[in-house]
Amino acid sequence: MSLAAPARRMYRENDPDMPEELHHLLVQMLSHHLENSANPYYNDLIIYLWDRCMRLPTDDQVKVALARLMQQEVEHGAITARLLEGLGAPPVNEPIQQYAFRIPLDTFCDLAYFHGLCDRVGVYIGETWETVPYEPMAKVAPKLHKDEVFHSTLGMRNLRLVCSTPEGRAEANEKIKTWWPAALDMFGRSDSTSSDAYVEWGLRQKNNAELRRQYIADTRPLLDELGIDVPEDRLNRRFL
């Protein structure tokens, strides 16, 4: 990581003046981004999620909302692939690293946690993309952020449905032990040098640890309201 980044300006696609370090960080960040239609592993995940979104809910209106969500997920994948192409990066063909996306979605409660907690992480990580000094990314940032807010809000609404019965609340209290640490680990390691470099170059306004603390402070009260006993933040964590 450099000691001091140059004065920030907006760079266009194929901009010959883009600093090499900024280009490297953009490619690195977007290559690690989950939503990427050029990655066959993401397309496999989309197929699995579509099946779960159509099979697990019993209410047709919930299915309609989830179908809209899935359409946006496909679009997000296409946007990321296009951004990487514009940066001259090779297609990504790697298994999805975040283990939260390998947790089986066996019940509607799992699906609600997946969107309510995991998609909510996307709100925080992409919240300031519109200030990223790369024009193509800044242009799509407002839409991506708005969509992620919809995804996480829908997930919390579905979790409220789950918790509306004693049986559902009991399941939610059991499964929070799996989903809470998985969501917190999605922010990455607190000592990540890449995270600090993203902040330095304006790709994020906060590093991994700061984003995770904000997420915890904002999300715990929402779960408390539903009668969910959120475990201690370090319980079952893999990345601190």
Image (cartoon, rainbow, N blue to C red):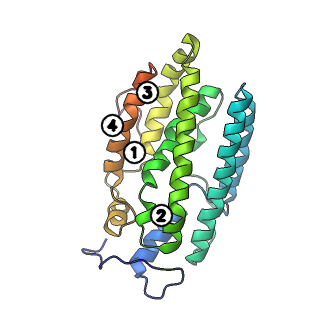
**Mark 3 crowdedness (10 Å alpha carbons): few <14, some 14-19, many ≥20:** many
Please name the residue that numbered disc 2 is placed on.
29
Looking at the image, residue 136 lies above or below residue 58 = below
Looking at the image, residue 36 lies above or below residue 201 = above
Discs 1, 3 touching: Cβ within 8 Å: no
**Mark 2 crowdedness (10 Å alpha carbons): few <14, some 14-19, many ≥20:** some
Q: CA distance from mark 1 to mark 3?
A: 22 Å
Q: CA distance from mark 3 to mark 2?
A: 30 Å
Residue type at mark 3?
Leu
Please name the residue that numbered disc 1 is placed on.
239
Check disc 3 and report its element: helix, strand or loop: helix
**Mark 4 crowdedness (10 Å alpha carbons): few <14, some 14-19, many ≥20:** few
Q: Of the residues tagged 3 and 2, which is closer to the observer?
A: 3
Q: Is residue 202 left or right of residue 97?
A: left
Please name the residue that numbered disc 4 is placed on.
217
Residue type at mark 4?
Ala
Q: In which image quadrant can residue 86 be found?
A: bottom right
Please name the residue that numbered disc 3 is placed on.
223
Discs 2, 1 touching: Cβ within 8 Å: no
Q: CA distance from mark 4 to mark 3?
A: 11 Å
Residue extending furthest toward the bottom: 16
Check disc 4 and report its element: helix, strand or loop: helix
Q: In which image quadrant can residue 107 be found?
A: top right
